[in-house]
Amino acid sequence: MSLSASAIRRALVLAPLAGQKGRAALSIAAIALGVALGYGVQLINSVAAGEFEHALRVLSGNADLSLHGARGGFPEDLYPEIASLPEVAAASPLIEFEARVPGETQPLKLLGIDVFRAARIQPDLAVAEGGESMDFLRPETLFVSRAAAQWLSLRAGDELALQTGLARAKFKVAGVLASSAVRERIGVMDIAAAQRAFGMVGTITRLDLRLRPGADAYALAARLRERLPPGLVIETPQALAERNASLSRAYRVNLDVLALVAIFTGSLLVFSSQALAVVRRRGEFALLRALGMTRRGVAGRVLLEAALLGVAGALPGLVLGHLVSGWVLQHYGADLGAGYFRGLDARVALDLPRLMLFGLLGIAASLAGSIVAAREAARAEPARALRAGDEQNAFLRVNKIAPGATLLVLGALTTLTPPVRGLPIGGYISIALLLLGVLALMPRISRGAFQLAPMRGPAPARLALAQLRGAPGPAGVSLAAIVASVALMASMAIMVFSFRHSLDDWLERVLPAQLYLRIPPGSEATLIPASLETQFVRLPGVSRVQFTRIEQVVLSPEHAPVTLLARDIDTSRADQLLPLLGEQRVPGPGAPPPAWISEALADLYQLRLGSVLEIPMNGRRAPFTVAGIWRDYIRQQGAIVIERAQFARLTGSGNASEAAFWLEPGWGTAELASRIRSVLPKGLESDLFEPGELRDISLRIFDRTFGVTYALEAVAVIIGLFALSASFGALALSRRREFGMLRHLGMTRGQIGTMLAFEGTLVSALGVGTGLALGWIISLILIHVVNRQSFHWTMDLHMPWGPLGAFAAVLLAAASLTAWAGARSAMQGGAVRAVSEAW
């Protein structure tokens, strides 16, 4: 029976894969892991951002313009003035704030609306199931969204207690919002009732406008900006949504890049396994060339194998990524621990464009990892490759210095490029170029390192070094995935460790007191009254109390609101309270009062010491002199510290929202906390923390935020170990004839295993050392370029010597064991049969 040409071609491709099931399985697993993480993270980010934008659209309804300010709101007197403009067809005022639900860790967003006006602009908020039509006007009732009802297990008629600041009220749940478009956890009530219940009488936080047909929204917005008090912004809902989405863009993009790293390391494993398979099958390819197959045909065969591996890995990877993303959204929410998307009831949905994109990326990664192997297989001279021992000459052509050196120079130069739309594009490119440059130089680095190594020790060790000196090509190729995975793991470990250590040091600086009282999130109008401040100061056991007022101000319509901290502070000793970067410059007589700004604010607004900063307060802009720049790891959009006395003078209200207590000697924090709670309004849940508790909470949030990073590091390490196993297994099998000859010369199986274990240790030691050095360089880019340009903060370098040393030791031990196991597998056929392959 004769076979068709197509059947022969299929057999030539599938037979090698079937004969090397272990190598193929490792390659498929690596691609699947990379695709699963990449697709899963991208899907979670997409769902979270989409739900966030959807929530903003629901809140905006069919508004053409939105007037808003900082969280504290603005006088409602502006509402009738703007609503009466001839261009305005309808205007809907509302207040938006958060209220604590007793027993819950996350607050509930509350919206106070005028139901008659909201029905024309935000109809999804004005229609409910259950209750009566007049319930929207009753002061003691509210409606909840389906997501909030499910979260809090609420039904119509239930009672719900809410606390915002020092105000607490109980409401009857009248029903559930009818519109399925409202997917956020929110409560909706009458605006006047919300103002009275939570101390916001005379204040609104937002005014949405629907214009008459033919009215120019941009022209009206430009005209109103000239009339509005400082600190208020009027813009289209689309612009508002884009700016809010930009707050999380750097975080989401960094996660996407980290996810792509997993696909990249999978590509390197394919590179190692395919390259070493080419070494092992060098004679097979030479025979095919001798029988008439062209170089293009040989290269195409290797690439076709890689494409099949890519497809086999991408398909289960996409399924796994979809399942994992759904599980993460269900159990941990859409924010991945960072807190950008709280309160969203996100559900994963099939995303065909992204599914196709990451499926193609998995196939492309497999193909990219096989290009060098395909070229090597095609270039081998048939007559020479058919001779025994020619495997040692494989991959000598990748021994050039120029390509790798060029990539390293370009990588160094791209670190100097500025961010693009707030994203460290140059930093990402620099890391990729440096990594590829070092990988391109690994054959030359390995040759130089093994030539310099002393030829000492027992015979198996000397033979191992002689083999590495004589065949640097395969050794250099096997190093690629090891170096990449170690470098990426080490760089992330150094960056995360440095960040965590810097955060811990920063918390130590900014939390000098023994006890802290924080008012729960909510209305900015509910603050600590002056009478309560006096009671705090007079409490037995209190030596000093520092009060802080926290507000939000809008410095520029192009940027998100920044945090204003009005604090009791000694201007001449601000460095004892704030972690200043550099010197402090106290303004002289006649100059505006001092303000200390975070480094994020300095970057975003191009400010430096001595600059004059205008802060909108009480309807006008108040000038301040930048007296210092301080490090802040909490407020990404920037923060300003001013004296509380100056804030009170400019606004007429100096009431605080936080208090820090210093104890007299001999007093305990538990006793003082009990006394503080005794003077607070009855029935309120108050946040009283010791500095150690705040540090623990902050570090737990940090670890949760970087949970995905830890997962990606683990995947990189796992793929690196896969690559290690595949590399030494393939090398051992390609050298069966050499082992057979050594057996004929008198070496025992144990000695050959020891020799190969030495080889594995030497190669891995070089890979680990190079990877750690490269990882240190990449960590500097992550710390000083990527994080600086993404989040506008600096950190100090701290090396995790213990974890890195343990990782290196485990990897070296695994390399020795894998190489020894590969030698035993290769020698199972017997010495005579192995040597006969060379006759």
Image (cartoon, helix red, strand yellow):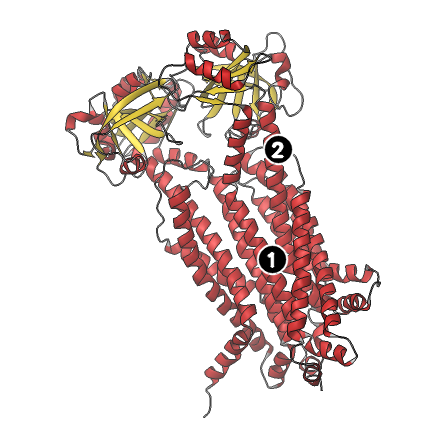
Hey, what amino acid is under mark 1?
A: Gly
* Numbered circle sitting on residue 720: 1
**Extreme-bottom residue of the structure:** 1
Q: Nearer the viewer, residue 260 or 627?
A: 260
User: x and y percent of residue 604 in the render?
Assistant: 54, 30
Name the quarter where the N terminus is drawn: bottom left
Check contact, mark 1 vs mark 2: CB within 8 A.
Answer: no
Closer to the camera in the image, 604 or 662: 662
Q: Which mark is residue 502?
A: 2
Element type at mark 2? helix
How many neighbours does mark 2 have within 10 angstroms: few (below 14), some (14-19), or many (20 or more)?
Answer: some
Q: CA distance from mark 1 to mark 2?
A: 29 Å
* 20 left or right, relative to 732: left
Of 720 and 667, which appears nearest the observer? Answer: 667
Quadrant occupied by the C terminus: bottom right
Answer yes or no: is residue 417 visible.
no
Q: Where, by quadrant of the figure, is residue 790 drawn?
A: top right
Residue 356 locus on image (x, y percent): 41, 58
Dot 1 or dot 2, earlier in sequence? 2
Q: Is residue 360 left or right of residue 187?
A: right
Percent across and percent down for residue 284 are: 62, 80
Question: Image height check: is 649 above or below 826?
Answer: above
- Tag 1 secondary structure: helix
Residue 727, by quadrant, is bottom right
Residue pictured at 36% horizontal, 49% vertical:
348
Number of on-image labels: 2
Label 1 packing within 10 angstroms: few (<14), some (14-19), many (20+): many
Disc 2 marks which amino acid?
Answer: Ser
Q: Is residue 639 visible?
A: yes
Q: What residue appears at the point 48 percent right and 85 percent down from the top-left corner?
A: 5
Left or right of 146, for residue 275? right
* Vertical placement of residue 359 versus 641, above or below: below
